[in-house]
Amino acid sequence: MRFELNREHIAGKMKELIRNIRSKKGPAEGLMNLNLKRFRSISRDEVLGLDIGSSSVKMVQLRKNRANYVVTAAHITEIGNGDGSNPARREINTVGAIQDCLQGSGIQTKLAVCGLCGPEVAVRDFNFPALPKEEVESAITLEASQVCPFSIDDSIVDYQLIPNGPNTVSGVLVAATNKLIKAKSQLAEEASLNCVLMDVEGLALLNCLAKYEKPEAGQTRAVLNIGGSFTTLAIVGDNNLPFVRDIAYGGNDIVKQIAAQCGVSTETVSTTLAGPEDTDQAQHDLEQGLGQACRKLVVDVNETLRYYSAQEKNAAVEKIFVCGGFAAAKGFVKILNTQLDAAVELWNPFDKIRCSAGSDCKSIIEKNGSAMAVAAGLAMRSI
């Protein structure tokens, strides 16, 4: 089902904001997204999922094959100057990384679905007494202004209504700042791509999870995506309402803390954590440093799990699927398994998505699949 919201111009470039509500559809369409379409009609439905992270760019293209998806192209490129000390240089390097992904993957479409995360994005559920239809949108906007940690006047708000009886208006709202939306769309445009859709990364992860990891009855599950600058925790329970929190602590922070503790470079830490198992004393010291560096993340995640269980009155989260660029670091999942209040499993969604591309693409998703989960979820969106 598709509804049109108000039209807004973002820096004179984003021409139209259209609501996209897909209640009760397939798993890849079941949760809402910020649907920012730049054209009134787009004849092609072929898009690419573009995950522009703080450390790397991930790109995935999928083809719908009956009830499943097939990987037709994928690529990943590291972003130089990852510390962000020179924003102008970093922007140039990011655009270069996007272009490298396009060239390396052989993707021809110019239609991209981009992801948003961080403190300028909010996902909240709402529940009002029954309202006249013409008052619903203003009530949701008011609710967003009260619960979002940024100004709604400089943001875009989207929402999805969820049937909950005749006496209530229930659903989920999503808000993101115009500044963040403009920044992401501009990076895509500078790489000669058309950003036709914006999605919340946590929702994209949950959609991908719902498609390929069927839950047991009554099971509450979560996805933990460890990026370079942010960690996204996305939870969904029996009520099918998404809960998303972005934690400002990621793989880059963990690496920097280990390097400071052990008196080595961040490059040494990254190489060691990504390399083969070793019995060397230095290896042992780095692994111990990993445990200490993960403490803040573990505390934040456990507090969020307990908050979710108390607030939503749901069963506790039983299983966490871990993905993201730092997820495959040696010893990381083991630490999470012993310290988080739920069972933890390293998740590579491409284990269950057939690849029809060449050997290079298969090698990329086999090696980096867990890091490309967001891009896969974005690529599942339809326009």
Image (tube, rainbow, N blue to C red):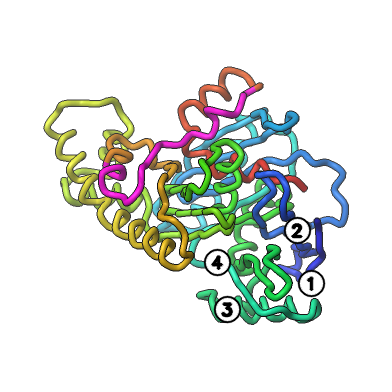
Residue 320 placed where, x, y %?
A: 42, 45
Residue 213 placed where, x, y %?
A: 54, 37
Disc 4 versus disc 3: distance between alpha carbons?
11 Å
Q: Nearer the viewer, mark 1 or mark 2?
A: 2
| Region in magenta | 335-355
Residue 3 placed where, x, y %?
A: 81, 63
* Element marked by disc 2: strand
Going by the numbered disc 4, the residue's amino acid type is Ala
**First reached walking from the N terminus: tag 3 or tag 1:** 1
Residue found at x 63% / y 51%: 114
* Element marked by disc 4: strand
* Element marked by disc 3: loop
Q: Which numbered tag is attached to residue 151?
A: 3
**First reached walking from the N terminus: tag 2 or tag 3:** 2
- Local packing at callout 2 (Cα closer than 10 Å; few below 14, some 14-19, many 20+) is many
Q: Mark 1 points at which residue?
A: 6
| Residue that extends furthest to the top in the rendered view of this protein | 359
The verdict on residue 309 being magenta is no
